[in-house]
Image (cartoon, grey):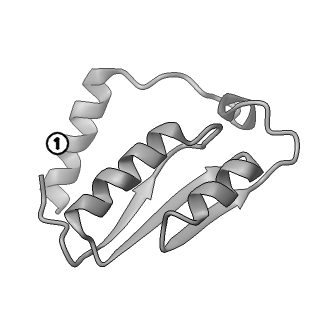
Amino acid sequence: MPDLKDKSVILVDDGLATGATARAAIRLLRQIRPLKVILAIPVCAPDTAASLGREVDELICLSLPTHFGGVGAWYQDFQQTSDEEVVELLRLTSKVL
């Protein structure tokens, strides 16, 4: 795991309904003591955004629909990404970093 202490960290998710996993990630990050925690999401339930906004230094959200429903409803294609695809993307990203 990279050393995140005293660094700005951008936590990204494809969207948040309850925000439970993002909240867990934020709390874990806070233990590492980053300089700043930024949560970036394309779509989020308004009450979840309000709650999580108090736990991060900055919240970036493109859409807060009143009638949220679920994350998948806001995508044309919400197919799951396979483990193999994730591993390949991480491998490619590590070459860039």
Q: Where is residue 43 in the image (x, y as percent from the top left)?
A: 67, 49
| Residue at figure coordinates x 56%, y 42% from the top left | 19
**With respect to residue 58, does 26 lie above or below?**
above
Spot the residue most to the right: 66
Looking at the rendered structure, the number of numbered marks drawn on it comes to: 1
Give the class, few, some or many, for how many residues have Cα within 10 Å of label 1's Cα (few <14, many ≥20): few
**Quarter location, residue 26:** bottom left
Asked if residue 20 lies left or right of residue 83, the reply is right
Depicted 21 relative to depicted 93: above or below: above
User: Which of the pair 97/55 is nearer the observer?
Assistant: 55
Residue 87 lies, with reference to residue 38, above or below; the image says: above
Residue at screen point 29% across, 22% down = 83
Residue 57 lies left or right of residue 45; in this view the side is left
Q: Position of residue 73 (x, y in %)?
A: 74, 30
Q: Nearer the viewer, residue 82 or 21?
A: 21
Horizontal and vertical percent for residue 33?
24, 69
Q: In this view, does 82 lie to the left or right of 93?
A: right
Residue shown at 19% from the left, 67% from the top:
4
> Looking at the figure, which quarter contains the C terminus?
bottom left
Give the amino acid type for the residue marked by disc 1 in the picture.
Answer: Arg
Q: Position of residue 82 (x, y in %)?
A: 36, 21
Q: Is disc 1 placed on a helix, strand or loop?
A: helix
Which of the 4 image quadrants contains residue 59?
bottom right
24 or 91, which lies in front?
Answer: 24
- Whether 48 is drawn above or below 50: the answer is above
| Residue carrying label 1 | 91
